[in-house]
Image (cartoon, rainbow, N blue to C red):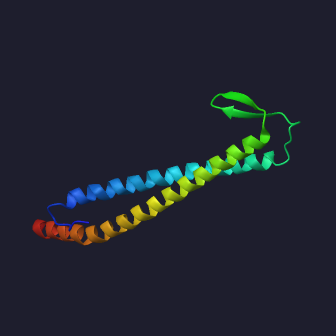
């Protein structure tokens, strides 16, 4: 990251805030995916004992569709779950990297902001 000076401190503060917001948005996505993964796991557990004799429906948008092949449904759900887990891992890595950048920027910003505040306080005395 570039050096922080009194001239570019506002720009760096704005960047810091944007990075925090991005981190929060990614954390929300992770939380949503966690919920979806848990729902998929519950569904798979419910389907463990299902046979061709059972009538099973799958929600597709606002429509319920009868499932003819339970085995195929289980495979699809497992694939979806695996895809969500990969996406979740990627998002967690992004959040970790972003949080590291945020911490570094905060470490650099703090002394410059304090210096500016001290200068302003001394000027008003």
Residue 123 in sight from this viewpoint: yes
Q: What residue appears at the point 32 percent right and 67 percent down from the top-left corner? A: 106
Residue nearer the viewer, 58 or 17: 58
> At which x and y percent is residue 93?
48, 62
Question: Which residue sits at x=12%, y=65%?
Answer: 124
- Image quarter in which the C terminus is found: bottom left
Q: Is residue 18 left or right of residue 62?
A: left
Q: Nearer the viewer, residue 26 or 75?
A: 75
The quarter of the image holding the N terminus is bottom left
- Image position of 90 (left or right of 7): right
Q: Is residue 78 left or right of residue 110?
A: right
Residue 75, image x, y percentages? 71, 46
Q: Relative to 7, does residue 75 appear above or below in the rendering?
A: above
Please indicate, yes or no, whether residue 34 appears anywhere in the rendered image.
no
Q: Position of residue 111 (x, y in %)?
A: 24, 72
Q: Position of residue 45 (x, y in %)?
A: 78, 50
Q: Residue at x 46, y 53 (%)?
A: 26
Residue at position x 72%, y 29% from top?
A: 65
């Amino acid at each position: 990251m570039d050096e922080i000076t009194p001239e570019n401190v506002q720009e760096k503060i704005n960047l810091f805030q944007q990075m925090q917001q991005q981190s929060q948005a990614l954390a929300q996505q992770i939380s949503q995916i966690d919920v979806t993964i848990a729902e998929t796991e519950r569904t798979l557990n419910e389907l463990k004992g299902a046979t061709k004799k059972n009538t099973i429906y799958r929600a597709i948008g606002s429509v319920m569709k009868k499932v003819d092949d339970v085995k195929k449904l289980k495979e699809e759900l497992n694939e979806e779950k695996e895809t969500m887990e990969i996406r979740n891992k990627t998002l967690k890595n992004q959040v970790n990297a972003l949080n590291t950048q945020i911490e570094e920027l905060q470490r650099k910003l703090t002394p410059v902001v304090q210096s500016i505040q001290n200068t302003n306080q001394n000027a008003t005395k």
